[in-house]
Amino acid sequence: MLPSFGGSSRLKDSRIIKALLSQKPIHYGKFMIVFANHNDLVHSRLAVVCVKRLKGAANRNRLKRRLRHAARKLLTQKGYDFVLIGKSEGLNAPFEDILAEIDTVLIKLAKNGKKLVP
């Protein structure tokens, strides 16, 4: 069973989010850009944002919900902070393609996990 997004798994501190966004992304894909770094916690945290050129709040919220649901797999990796930037291509993409991209992120994370230390 995949973890849910409780209050402790949401990354809310804007200073941490801005610090993550100033680093090099670990994945630049068709549907999302992923930034990650180690944290000192026993659980992972996640923030999902969208590009502004995706017009309409309803579309941005729908894309964030899709990415949040797909990113539940990322929370199985303990001790990371993740920021996902949703791209407009993810709005109408098949959900299986988004999950496949999350799997790609997990593979990259497993290969290069030691390089994410600040």
Image (cartoon, rainbow, N blue to C red):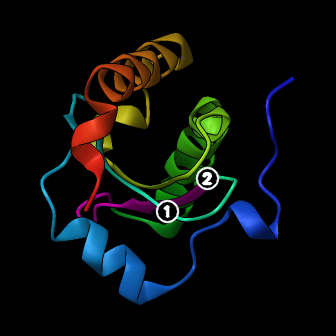
Of labels 1 and 2, earlier in sequence is 1
Amino acid identity at mark 2: Ser
Closer to the eye: label 1 or 2: 1
Q: Which mark is residue 14?
A: none
Query: Is residue 31 something one can see in this rendering?
Result: no
Q: Residue furthest right?
A: 1
Q: Residue at x 51, y 85 (%)?
A: 13
Position of residue 35 in the picture relative to residue 102 (left or right): left
Q: Position of residue 107 (x, y in %)?
A: 37, 16
* Residue 114 forms part of the magenta stretch: no
Give the residues drawn in magenta, as a range. 44-54
Q: Mark 1 touching mark 2, by CB under 8 A?
A: yes
Find residue 44 and name its label. 2
- Residue on which the image places disc 1: 39
Quarter of the image containing the C terminus? bottom left
Q: Is residue 43 left or right of residue 2?
A: left
Q: Whole-percent x and y of residue 35?
A: 30, 52
In the picture, residue 70 is in which quadrant?
A: top right
Residue type, numbered disc 1: Asn
- Quadrant housing residue 73: top right
User: Label 2 crowding class (10 Å Cα cut-off): few <14, some 14-19, many 20+?
Assistant: many
Note whether 68 is above or below 101 in the view shown: below
Label 1, secondary structure: give it. Answer: loop
Q: Quadrant of residue 77?
A: top right
Q: Residues within 10 Å of mark 1 (few under 14, many from 20)?
A: some
Q: Residue at x 38, y 34 (%)?
A: 90
**Residue toward you, 67 or 113:** 113
